[in-house]
């Protein structure tokens, strides 16, 4: 005979899976934002370097 799980256990597992999925999506969003921040920082650093060199050349 196959033992069936109680409804509460099944619902709890579904709840935990949905929480895990949500947390995983949020971590992916954070990682993408961090990557965008790194890219923006590089662009800004390059621009600061250009402006500084132009200023020093005057």
Image: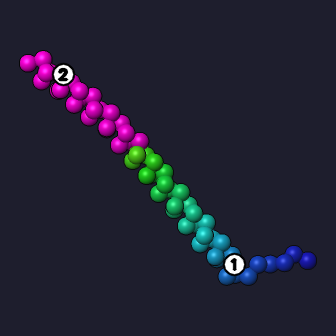
Residue drawn at x 21%, y 24% is 50
Residue drawn at x 59%, y 72% is 15
Residue 13 is situated, as x and y percent measured from the top left of the image, at 66, 72
Applied colour scheme: rainbow
Residue drawn at x 31%, y 38% is 40
Q: Is residue 25 left or right of residue 8?
A: left
* Residue 9 disc label: 1
Question: Vertically, is 25 above or below 2?
Answer: above
* Residue 42 disc label: none
Question: Vertically, is 38 above or below 28?
Answer: above
Q: Which residue ends up furthest to the left in the rendered image?
A: 58
Q: Helix, strand or loop at disc 1?
A: helix
* Residue 53 disc label: 2
Residue 33 is situated, as x and y percent measured from the top left of the image, at 39, 47
Q: What quarter of the picture does the C terminus occupy?
A: top left
Q: Which residue ends up furthest to the right in the rendered image?
A: 1
Q: Which residue ends up furthest to the top in the rendered image?
A: 57
Is the magenta region chiefly helix, strand or loop?
helix
Whether the magenta-drawn stretch holds residue 53 is answered as: yes
Whether the magenta-drawn stretch holds residue 3 is answered as: no
Residue drawn at x 13%, y 21% is 56
The magenta region covers: 35-58
Residue 35 sits in which quadrant?
top left
């Amino acid at each position: 005979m196959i033992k069936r799980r109680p409804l509460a256990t099944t619902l709890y597992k579904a709840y935990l899976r949905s929480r895990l999925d949500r947390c995983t999506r949020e971590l992916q969003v954070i990682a993408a934002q961090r990557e965008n921040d790194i890219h923006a920082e590089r662009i800004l650093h390059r621009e600061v370097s250009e402006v500084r060199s132009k200023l020093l050349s005057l």
